[in-house]
Image (tube, helix red, strand yellow):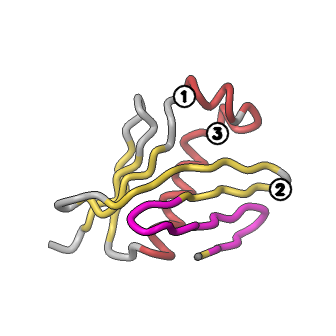
Amino acid sequence: MGTSTSGNWRVEIIENGRSGNLIYHEDSWDASFYYEFGGGDVIAIIYGRPASEWLQKYPWAVFRRQEILERVAGETIRLKAKSCVASFDEKSGNLLLRNQKQ
């Protein structure tokens, strides 16, 4: 398990074989995202959820979706995937961590 703290937020990584959960903690709020390892140049896929689901699951963060997903991606890269860069699909909310050293 990896954890990073910066300011009043942190990202916790819970590994479970080839998948797991990334939990974004901020003050007394949490948001959980499933991830799994990818294939080819995609090292991992983080399922960030479409914007419509954020209203229901994370109303406290609905207007900060992109900011929070960027934090999750950045901390995941810093802690577990230093050679990766993230790309974001706005519609699905998914983040792809791709190996940049090829």
| Quadrant of the image containing the C terminus | bottom left
**Camera-nearest label, 1 or 3:** 1
Which residue does the numbered mark 2 point to in the structure image? 27
Q: Is residue 9 magenta?
A: yes
Is residue 81 found left or right of 56 in the rendered image? left
The residue sitting at the top extreme is 52
- The quadrant holding residue 65 is top right
Label 1 to label 2: alpha-carbon separation:
22 Å
Boundaries of the magenta span: 3-20
Residue 71: image location, x then y, percent: 57, 57
Residue 81 point in image, percent of width and height = 39, 73
Residues 89 and 56: in front is 56
* Three-letter code, disc 2: Asp
Q: How far apart are labels 2 and 3 at the CA level?
A: 15 Å
Task: Provide the residue designation for mark 3.
Answer: 64
Q: Earlier in the sequence, mark 2 or mark 3?
A: 2
Mark 3, Cα crowd under 10 Å, few <14 / some 14-19 / many 20+, is: few
The local crowd at label 2, few if under 14, some if 14 to 19, many if 20 or more residues have their Cα within 10 Å, is few
Q: Amino acid at mark 1?
A: Ala
Which residue is disc 1 drawn over? 51
